Image (cartoon, rainbow, N blue to C red):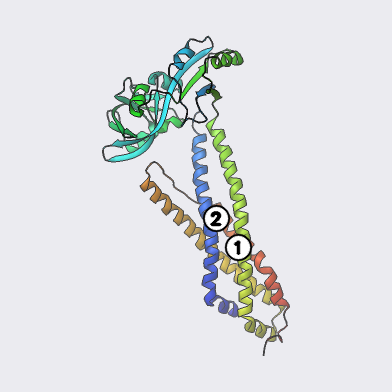
Amino acid sequence: MLYLKIFLRRNDTSHSILIIALLAAMLASAYSINSFLNAQIEALASLREPAGKKYVILGGESISNSRLNPLLADSLRSLQHIGNVTAERIFWSNVSVGPIRFESLVRGVSNVKEFLSMRKAYLNGSAATNMAEAVIGELVSKAYSIGVGSKIHLTYNGRSLILTVTGLFRTQTEIDSEIIVPIVAAFNLTGEEEASLIEFSLKAGADVSEALKEVAGLLPRDARIVCTQQPTLFARQINTQIIRFLAFWSLAVHAVVASASYIIATRLIEETSYEIRMLMALGARRLSIFTLIISYIIIVATSGSILGSALGLIGTQMISAALSWLTPSIRMAPFLEPQQALQILLTTIFSAIMGCIPPAHRAAKMKYTERLL
């Protein structure tokens, strides 16, 4: 125990702890972000997805570059197998509500009341009916304290529009974080009378292949039909990919921890070789020398892991807070689960022990007569 204290009082001990701490901080920051994303996915899983299968017509590879003639929606309504049809223009807009400023997704739809009805929405107030009105999703309303009768100022590419909030809606789906306006308001704000997509559903009992064939016959050459996916399933798949990435990332970091432990143990043995040989001369067994070095590494790894986990979590939270302040639309709250902190601690200690075993074994096999003079 006395010699262990002597080892710990070395100047290099604090440097060794810091090295392990920085490596553990990398793991802690990655795990804390993943915990936040996983919590968001679980929250998404608790939301109710819209009933019935829906189809979307896009005029490009993605919604951002998709452009369609909104009159195509009128043509679809005349088809025998088609149920509800909605032309939509989707874009990000800067929003001002008094002194509050933020970014929000704005969705212009051909008929706000019909659109909310398709989503089985609960509406507090009335649906927007003209280009001076809007309805706000529950999440936006709560986040920025927007109520019925509030005035919101939308700005997009130098163009602006002041709207009155006529209703607050809740669908328990992803659109609760959006602002819904009549499509004429979206056209006026963007300066383009083109839809981003056209959403439609089929009537009950309709032949799917026949209906889609009819729709395809009306589409321009560059348009395509996409069956909407379940967002929860998609999010869970993304989360699985993130977890796999973290697993490989953890292996890489722990390999570096093992390498660092090897170097730390080697330097310890070289710099304290006189003390080690004195212990052997006094009758210390090889197992005692081996245990002494392993104990030193365990203390360094434990201290470094605890310090690193704290630094990684606090650093990530500070960066997230700064990012939220600079960009209010981005809100992150990274956190570490207790089992994750324990996992980082145990795996770091294990990796450090694995790395220090070879030099510790060599030190235990040395003869005390070597290099005493």
For the residues labelled 2 and 1, say whether their Cβ atoms are less than 8 Å apart.
Answer: no
Image quarter of the N terminus: bottom right
Query: Which residue sits furthest bottom?
Result: 373
Question: Relative to 325, does residue 135 appear above or below in the rendering?
Answer: above
Image side of residue 104 versus residue 373, left or right: left
Q: Residue at x 40, y 19 (%)?
A: 110
Q: Quadrant of residue 153?
A: top left
Q: Residue at x 49, y 57 (%)?
A: 312
- Asked whether residue 337 appears in the rendered view, the answer is no
Q: Residue at x 41, y 44 (%)?
A: 331
Q: Quadrant of residue 108?
A: top left
Residue behind mark 2: 27
Task: Give coordinates of residue 130: x percent, y percent.
Answer: 31, 20
Give the camera-side residue of 340 and 62: 62
Give the camera-side residue of 224 and 279: 224
Task: Give coordinates of residue 155: x percent, y percent.
Answer: 32, 34
**Disc 2, SS:** helix
Residue behind mark 1: 257
Question: Relative to 64, does residue 252 appear above or below in the rendering?
Answer: below
Q: Quadrant of residue 357?
A: bottom right
